[in-house]
Amino acid sequence: MEKIELTGMRKSYGKEVAVRHLDLTIEPGAFLTILGPSGCGKTTTLRVIAGLEEPDTGIIQLGDKIVFSRDDGIIVPPEHRNLGLIFQSYALWPHMTVERNITLALKEQKLSASEIEQRLENALEMVQLDAYRYRYPSELSGGQQQRVAVARLIALRSRFLLMDEPLSNLDAKLRTEMRTELKHLHRDLEATTVYVTHDQIEALTLSDIVVVMNEGLVMQHGTPYDIYHHPSNLFVAEFIGDPRMNTFTGTPKNDGGQAMFECGDLSFAMPGDLQPKTGNLIATIRPENINVSKTEREGWLKVALESVQPTGASTILQACTEHISMTLLQPGFIQMDVGDFLWIDVDTSTVNFFDPDTEQNLKS
Amino acid sequence: MSFPQTELKKPPVFSGRNLYYHFYRIRTKPELILGVLCLSVLAVLVMVPLFEIIYDALTFQEYDKAYQKDGVVGEFTWLHLKRVFTGPLSNALFFKPLMNSLAIGAFVTFFGVSIGSGLAWLLVRTNIRFKGVFGSLVVIPYMMPSWVLALAWLSVFKNDRIGGSEGMFTYMFGIQPPDWMSYGFVPIVICLTMHYYAYGYLLMSGALATVDSELEEAGAICGMNRRQRLWRITLPLLMPALGSAVVLTFIRILGTFGTPALLGLPVRFFTFSTQIYASINARNSGDAYVLALVLIFMAITFIWINSRVIGIRKSFVTLTGKGFRQREIELGVWRWPATIGVAVFIVCIVILPMLILLWESLIITPGSYTLEGLTTHFWFGESDPNLAYGEPGVIHSTGIMTALWNTIQLGVSAAVLNGMFGLMIGYAAVRGRGTLLAKWLEGIAFAPYIFPSIALGAIYIGMFSTPFGPMPALYDTFAILVLITVVKNLPFTSRTGIAAMLQIDKSLEETARVQGIGWFRRMAKIIIPMSTSGLISGMLLTFITTMRELSLIILLLSPSNMVLSGLIFSYNEQDMSQHSGAVTLLLVVIIVSINFLVQFLSGGKGLSGLKNS
Ligand SMILES: Nc1ncnc2c1ncn2[C@@H]1O[C@H](COP(=O)(O)OP(=O)(O)OP(=O)(O)O)[C@@H](O)[C@H]1O
Ligand SMILES: [Mg+2]
């Protein structure tokens, strides 16, 4: 198992800068996901690691070996980087059967026939495609094609796996299935993996580490738990989570020794050591961290229901007072009418506070 | 928010490390290496010859000593320009051929494009009968040499003006056809029109087939009536195709040699192309170069005007036909007359000339068209000193068999080399899209388009008659024929190559690359297998056009590298009409059957590739 390390990487296409600055270390055997909105530079980063694009500056290291460093005059072409790469389009060769798709690179490496046969059978078995060995890609379904691409990776036994939105062409059910399989694959191959996606569920379920990118910069780098619970800036807070995070802009008040956050008629206790530079603060609360009661309770805020969207296992509620509105998430299939009243209470331990100017988390 | 920013510091250009880096960097970009390679080869094959003849036209040459004893070879001189443009010979050398060429060009382009468009309209848009059969028959002239009709014309209308045998007309009616009917302007225009209408037909039928669907949609949405749709949508959309058809036809006619030579030279009726030929034969290459340059200049002007009128981007748009469902126009009572008309037309231009040439090849005494005098001697007979100067029949003639072998070799090597070149240019241009190199490459590959065939031939004589750099003198060799054919077909093949490469997604190659497969293996295993089907129609087209080519190579032919078309021309010059007829038939039969064979084998429509040419 070997690490991947990018230092000070920058990549532009003519005037347009795709990746502005990237320092990234992927620990040996780790599963790292790059997550971000469309056009933020995810694919570019992956292609730079693979050697398909040449960065403007920076150092790229695979294992102990530097594969790119302009200043040292080093540039190792993709052929010699020993990587496995899955494209979003799978990139299966349409004029070759499944078998030939998988074995071409092995044959080019001049492996022995028995070795090739063994790897082929092993790979096909892992993705359960034994029966499709002599089919052409056009005769396979989208999911099967994707599995052929995976099998090709398995047979190659690369030290590093790079995947660019490999699940985005699949339907929801298949996507869930394949997600589990990819996780197994990573565990079995023990390869250092970089996975690119704009689907946060994939990122949170699959990865050891998530890197959130925006406009060519890393916004946060951390475990899925950290990313979800302790977003280091407002972009990450709002980007991660579905339904979206509630944000309230308000002012801190001192109420008899206890610091309070106030926004309209909503007010709750906050840590006293958070002092904003200007008067205001932004508080973010996940919809599931607001407690809800159908009956009146002491000290809870009364809100009116605006919409009810049951999704099966849980229900998304939209509620408001005269001054503020918010999203709530409750377990179960809730049937209520618009205009009904609810009482809510904020779980203060889960609230994050941000400086409105720097948009940085005040705790970290 | 504040984030770290990377400083962009440029390392010094000539430091050892930087050079080292760039060396490796270029090595990782095969498209760059290939692009530079193609560009330099093309520059040598296309641009250098052009400068060479400009230089030759403006300097004193060895052969000029016949006119000016005290001249120094290699010195700058106006001699050639003066002689062509202002000297006492300028009328015969320049102005008359110019007028003849322009007049022929204008007439043939007008009639040819009109007939072609008319046929296209009939076969694409109306409910005429036998569309499929007609559709494949009307493009047969494209496969035949352009001068087949001229040969057939001579067989029928030859008169006693130049001695030798007389034609069928005289034999049957006992009167001599007038000169204007036998030779010169009128028959040249008729014969060329009946060949070059095919270009107009191909371009316009493709355009008509694509335009319609857009018209239906737009018309339905905007609620335009028929007239408005015709004027606002159909015609503007057809303009680029019409413009291309006009330019293409006109340039081809400027450079065409066979027909004006067969029908014009006997009465000393010169066009630009035949005048260039005459000048080269008279060892006045300087004059020929000046004329060739004028021809190129005219072609460029014409392309330029067309691109100004229609718009640069659209002017070379080629519209490929897709099968849209279309509402056919009802011809009503005209349906059968139109069908019969097209049938008669096809018989007259395809079948009749072939029958005439067949008959011509079977008569024992030229000019005597009796049924008793028929013989197969000129096909299968051994040498007989009393017949045709002792020239044996086709299958026993080593001259013909050698020329046939040369022709096939030429066709095959030109097709294969063009396919390879097209693939490489396509690869370099598509992978390097957006770079200056790719742009130049596409541009220079297109350049041969503006050289009329005969002018390119003249350029190649100028360039390769003496050793050039490491290249030996190629004059009289087979290699020069291959070279010029490959170059002349480049505009077309490079476009097929680019189209084929565009269909191969970049990721298919990148995947292989990441898996450790080197460039040559990627080409062999992925790029070439995936692009052959796209290249095959282009290669077939090169093969066909090469087999029947005369204008391009006439100046470069000699007994040592003779091909069939040149042989036919020389048989005709020697008034051996049976042989010229027989060999022409042989050539046409070979071309047509190879075309159908390839179509059959590739399972595709071989001729559909023609739409792009
Ligand atoms: N070949 C290219 N030429 C010019 N600009 C490019 C090129 N490839 C990418 N870009 C630009 O670089 C930026 C980052 O592109 P990239 O493909 O890395 O985005 P992404 O994060 O993968 O987005 P998506 O989720 O939509 O795939 C975009 O603004 C894009 O327009
Ligand atoms: Mg992407």
Image (cartoon, coloured by chain):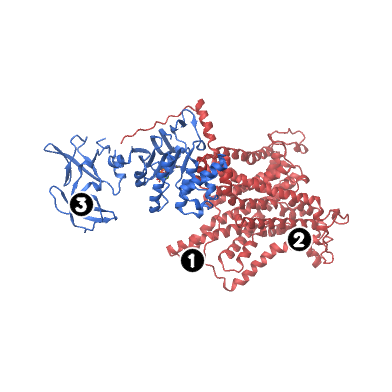
Instruction: Kindly identify which residue carries mark 2.
Output: B357
User: Residue drawn 52% across and 38% down?
Assistant: A79
Q: Colour of chain B?
A: red
* Vertical relation: B145 (above or below) B474: below
Q: Are marks 3 and 1 on the same chain?
A: no
* Vertical relation: B395 (above or below) A123: below
Q: Are marks 1 and 2 on the same chain?
A: yes
The percent coordinates of residue B232 (x first, y second) are: 48, 60
- Assess disc 3: are there few (<14), some (14-19) or many (≥20) residues with their C-alpha within 10 Å of its C-alpha: some
Instruction: Kindly identify which residue carries mark 3.
Output: A320
The percent coordinates of residue B91 (x first, y second) are: 71, 48
- The answer as to whether callout 2 falls within 8 Å of ligand 1 is no
Under mark 3, the amino acid is: Cys
* Numbered label tally: 3
Horizontal relation, residue B513 to residue A219: left or right: right
Q: Earlier in the sequence, mark 1 or mark 2?
A: 1
Circle on res. B392: none
User: Residue drawn 62% across and 69% down?
Assistant: B338
Residue B173: image quadrant is: bottom right
Dot 1 falls on which chain? B
Q: Nearer the viewer, mark 3 or mark 2?
A: 3
